[in-house]
Image (cartoon, rainbow, N blue to C red):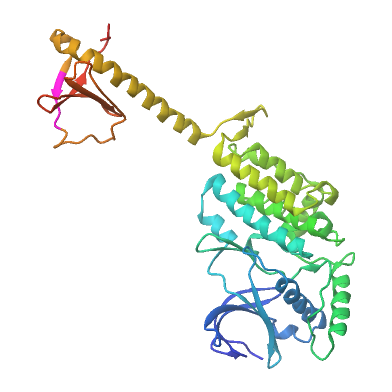
Amino acid sequence: MKIEAGQQLLHYRLTEKVGEGGMGVVWKALDTELHRNVALKVLPPELTNNEERRLRFQREAQAAAALNHANIAVIHGVGEDGGVQFLAMEYVQGVTLRQHMAKCEGGHREWLRLALQIAEGLAHAHGNGVVHRDLKPDNVMVTTEGHVKILDFGLAKLLEPRPGLEGEGGSQADTKTALDTISRELTRAGKVYGTVSYMSPEQARGGTVDTRSDLFSFGIVLYEIVTGKLPFSGDSAMDTLSAILRARPEPVVASKPDTPAELQRILDKCLEKEPRDRYQDTRDLVVDLRRLRRETDSQPVQQVDTTSGVRIQGDKPQRSTFGWVAAGVALVAIAIAAVFLLPRLAQSPGPQRDLRPRQLTANPPANPITASAISPDGKYLAYADYEGLYFRLLSSGEDHRLELEEGFCFR
């Protein structure tokens, strides 16, 4: 059966094709009953007679429908119409994480924000016995409001199969048995599913996959967010798989010297070759990312000198803030000193000072006043901004700028 825009599947009217992959074609559609946009993933017609693919499609619905989290796309239901099997899910308005990375230069705060949301979504899925098995930037959406949504649990493995999904022409028990059989088939040695560049070593070998495999894939995604490149790559798929199995990625500080040292530790732990050496619980990863985000927001970031390997403290925004504070303190000191010295300056010989009229009402200062004080004799108001030092003769209201010749000093 040919699928095209304008066609209706049950109460869903297809409006435009938005994507296509190994698991099916994704359409934007209108739910005519609830009057909302949804995304329909339609199993390709040439695969409708493939029992394994049909059961994998059902398994995607079963796995994803069990999840309810802000960072995971919601599954509305599964259906079939005229021999076309489809999955209805939340329509996410936004761009893929890959597209977002290409146009966004948000720095540490942005990649930490995104990484934390992805990790929180994964932690929820893992806590419900679901492994994604194909985590990559193309399967993560960033909404127009900046929120992360993980898509496509089509390759997910149910650690604890759940009853309740009734298959075509069979009972719940028959469907559960079939799903268990396909689950074992998908994870048997030598059979590989997923995207090569984001696979874990055990997945690349066709071995047993669990939540720790997703954490390896998460490490690859995080590395790519920070550096803009993959940690493992090659001229061919086999070269990439070989790198995943044997190579150590280049430290992130080699391309991003201002990267926090704690991030390198988190990445190293995610990208360990052996699952037993990685995070054993995704919630521990979430805790570490939250701590790093707090430290990045509130303290100077610890960095690594790329030439010496020595960890140093440094954060340009912190230094900049310190500079403004220091400047403000200096101006306060100058203003306070000025109010005591203005009477002496007014009596001093001309060569030592130049008092120039300055009308504030006509030409207000470009920078806000940072310090002010009244002289002990009550005749002058001295004030300073980031452009200079001024005083006002209170009897007349006239403002002047104080300019001292080079080498002049108060004494």
Left or right placement of residue 42 versus residue 280 in this view:
left
Against 104, is 151 above or below?
A: below
State the image quarter where residue 70 is shown. Answer: bottom right
User: Is 230 displayed left or right of 211 in the figure?
Assistant: left
**Residue furthest out toward the top:** 411
Q: In which quarter of the image is the N terminus?
A: bottom right
On the image, the x and y values in percent for residue 334 come to 31, 19
Q: Which residue is drawn at 28% across and 32% down?
A: 369
Figure disc tally:
0
- Report which quarter residue 214 is drawn in: bottom right
User: Looking at the image, which residue is at 31% across and 30% down?
Assistant: 370
Secondary structure, magenta segment, majority class: strand
Q: Nearer the viewer, residue 299 or 231?
A: 299
In this rendering, would 385 be left or right of 301? Answer: left
Q: Where is residue 224 in the image (x, y as percent from the top left)?
A: 64, 51
Residue interval drawn in magenta: 355-359
Residue 249 appears in view:
no
- In percent of width and height, residue 231 lies at 70, 49
Q: Which quadrant holds the C terminus? A: top left
Query: Which residue corresponds to the image point at 77% horizontal and 50% vertical from the top-left?
Result: 243
Q: Residue furthest bottom?
A: 82
Residue 269 vertical position relative to residue 32 in the rendered view, above or below: above
**171 in the magenta segment:** no
Nearer-the-camera pick, 405 or 322: 322
